[in-house]
Image (cartoon, rainbow, N blue to C red):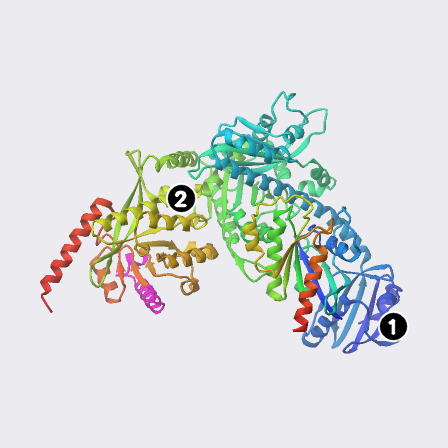
Amino acid sequence: MNISLFKALGIIDCCVFKRLDADHYETLYAEHEWIDLLLPQARQEKSFTSPCDSPFLDDFLMQAEEFWEYADYGKIESGIWNEKINDQELKLNAYATMDNGDFYLIIDNVLDLFKQRQKTLQSARELLLSNDKIVAQQEYIHQRLDELLNQSTTLKNIQQPITEVIEKTEVGVAILSPNLQPISQNPALYSVFDTQLAQAETEPYQLILQLFEKQYPEFERVISTGSRWSGELFWLQPPGNGKWLKLAIYPVKTDFQQITHWVFIVNDISQVKHLLQNNEKLTHYDALTDIPNRQYFWMQLEQSVNNAMPFYLLYLDIKNFKRINEIHGHSRGDQIIQELVERIAPHISASDMLARIGGGEFAIIRQKTVTEQQCIDLGHILIETATQPFYLPNGTHCEIGLNIGAASFPRDADDAETLMKFADLAVFNAKKATKSSVQFYSQKLKDASQRIIELENALQNAITNHEFELFLQPMLDLTTGTILKAEALLRWNRLDTEKIGPDEFIPIAEQTGLIVPIGKWVISKACEMISTLNHRGQNCKLSVNLSPRQISDRHLLDFIRTSIKNNHIQPDQLELELTEGVLVDNYDKVQFLLTEVRKLGVSVSIDDFGTGYSSLSYLKKLPIDHIKIDRSFIQDLVNDENDKAIILAIIAMAHSLKLNVIAEGVETELQRNFLQLNHCNLAQGYLFSRPLPFAQFCDYLTTTANQTLIGQSALGPK
Amino acid sequence: MIQKKICLLGASGVGKTSLIKQFVEGIFSDKYLTSIGVKIDKKRVECQSDSVQLMLWDIEGIDRYCGFQPKYIRGAAAIIIVVDHTRSQSLIEGIEIFKLARDVSDVPAILAINKADLDSTWHWGEDELAELSHPFSHTFHTSAKSGANVELLFSTLAQKLLSEAEQ
């Protein structure tokens, strides 16, 4: 280490020591007086032992000793620490390093760096705290109001408690009816708009709606689909300078997803904006990712429209980003966003623009003349990039999905607002798919979107209109041929005219949350059917499917208990079916639920086994009784050696874990023979029976029971 | 007298520095000044059988600007996770920090729910809070401003560490 260089430079505010042996150092460079406070002996003696009064330095030296002993190269750093000695404050940073077999300790006086860092972080953290506080206030008010508004549907009953919640809060709150008529607006909301209750020419809620509609193309979609939304509005009322407002919109819905109220929560964030605007970079760039923000993006989008050259707009939305934040915490969410941008950015050419336009939302303007196919290809590359696992510092990993919507200028729209609206609609449609996908705006998409909205509305009334029906598909013991149980499958006869397939309506029910009441109806109906079968002397277990949303419903367990009790059936006559995906995504909740249902006596099957995740550890850890081999393996088993091998492996593994195996989608004798020969326990499929309405299922049970009896008597006495 | 290292951890702005300042110097300032790096304060706590010198490591708030540093936990006899009950996010982050700390150390952990002088604006009910605070050996609702439960927090901790040392 060239100490003369330090001396020649003279400007470096540090001290350098060479380690002679444990706790014994030689002073190489210690020109600065501050070191006398920390290590008084360092400048008095050529070499010294390190007794010092700094617990932090002591702690670091212990780490340094380990480093010098075990590491081969490099350095370690203590991080900044504050030292107060004799009323003097030092801001220091220490390094332990090695060079050609010699070990060095460097202590750096970082006062300037400390001041600079504190100045930067002071305002950054003030912003962070203000933002956190606003979000917390909005969430809190929303939570309280949601509880109240859900308790009672009559206005009279809720007026008093609502007044208590919103009258004294500093946050502006408006409660509106489903058709956006005012029910309640608090004094703070009038203050936000510099007016008073009696004087308002235009009511605050009207101003909010006007600003939202004018400034955000999402307005129509948010209102028509009853979605949550949050964002910033700018309200200009000359001669004033205008105000920046943070608006959060929450629809309050019943279990059947009918909107009972809208809650609008407004905070004045002008001061936060003012802090941001002092720094031009912060005004146009997102602080977290350092890419253009929403404001800058809009400027560029309008500029691109003015240039009148064709371009594409891609709208990227991280799947379930809110859930990622809830599970892993916001700081992890931030890290994922940062890493995602690092992954995406290299795929964006210099002439294109990538911007962060919302929490988990990004937009890309593709300026160059490219084809739609090239945009789709880019979308797929981005999805593939995004879906690689994100490794978290705590050793776990997390996977995300990406929905991409796209619109073309001028083909789809010739103004920025409409273009954005169409890209938003396309991404909204892409969200409906379970997997990440790219959707281009088209008339067909618009029609499909309308169809979904129509089905959503119809689904809300399907239970009360008695439009659902449970079909039952038997599962047979492959050795004895007896029916041991049946799977309950939901059918929707819409208005008795149109039969909607489960493939179409289940995803909508899942997306909207309607799956929770529908799932309860299924459980309740299945228990009722078991009871009827018991009365008819036809004992048969029924299995019902559980969706991811149902798992998150904290009332599910109680509901299962009550349904069993009310129908006077035995818990072991009911079975729950879950897919592998549900297990992996909600492991903690699933573990709790399955343990509790096992205590009750209800059995559990894993559906579609083999199509999802490769992690099998859950099979050992969770209380599972059966696994159902997915129909895709059964379909080709006669011709496909790989499928045969997979089935044999599944059966062997399941049996070694003492689990029963059920084969789904059995349609031919050859399939049945193969499964029987290889000790698969049960089978289900068209070979035995299609899913049947309840009455026909009862008949089928009777017929099969008679046939079994005849078969047994034909064998004669043993 | 025994000496013990205690690390205060939490999101930024929850009041770690203020808690220590209240405990060590008995003063409080409403002005928020962000901490940079680490600052160590000492205070001797008299217990029934002996006294304990607490070395209080005030560690910069963990957020997007400053990550969790496992090296600071080394040698700690206990950790205090500080959260702010006016910001629900700080509890989520506090629990996350606790999990990270648990990966490197299994010393006793105390949850300090700070700013008790202000109205709570988080949505966790008592049951949920009880579940979240289950892995902590103690939970205190503190106010660095009024001093409520601050002395109790540190004296309980000192007594616990002393009892452990005596065993």
Circle 2 chain: A
Residue A594 x/y as whole percent: 41, 57
Mark 1 lies on residue: A41
Q: Amino acid under label 2?
A: Ile
For residue A373, say whether it is visible.
yes
In the image, residue A512 lies in the stretch drawn in magenta: no
Q: Residue at x 86, y 68 (%)?
A: A30
Vertical comparison of A124 with A459: above or below: below
Quadrant for the C terminus of chain A, please.
Answer: bottom left
Q: Residue at x 86, y 72 (%)?
A: A42
Residue A713 x/y as whole percent: 10, 62
In the image, residue A658 lies in the stretch drawn in magenta: yes
Mark 2 or mark 1: which is in front?
A: 2
In the image: residue B20, left or right of residue A35: left
Q: Amino acid under label 1?
A: Gln
Mark 2 lies on residue: A515
Of A58 and A160, nearer the camera is: A160
For residue A418, say whether it is visible.
no
- Give the magenta part as a residue range: A632-659
In the image: residue B89, left or right of residue A149: right
Of A513 and A705, nearer the camera is: A705
Residue A163 x/y as whole percent: 58, 32
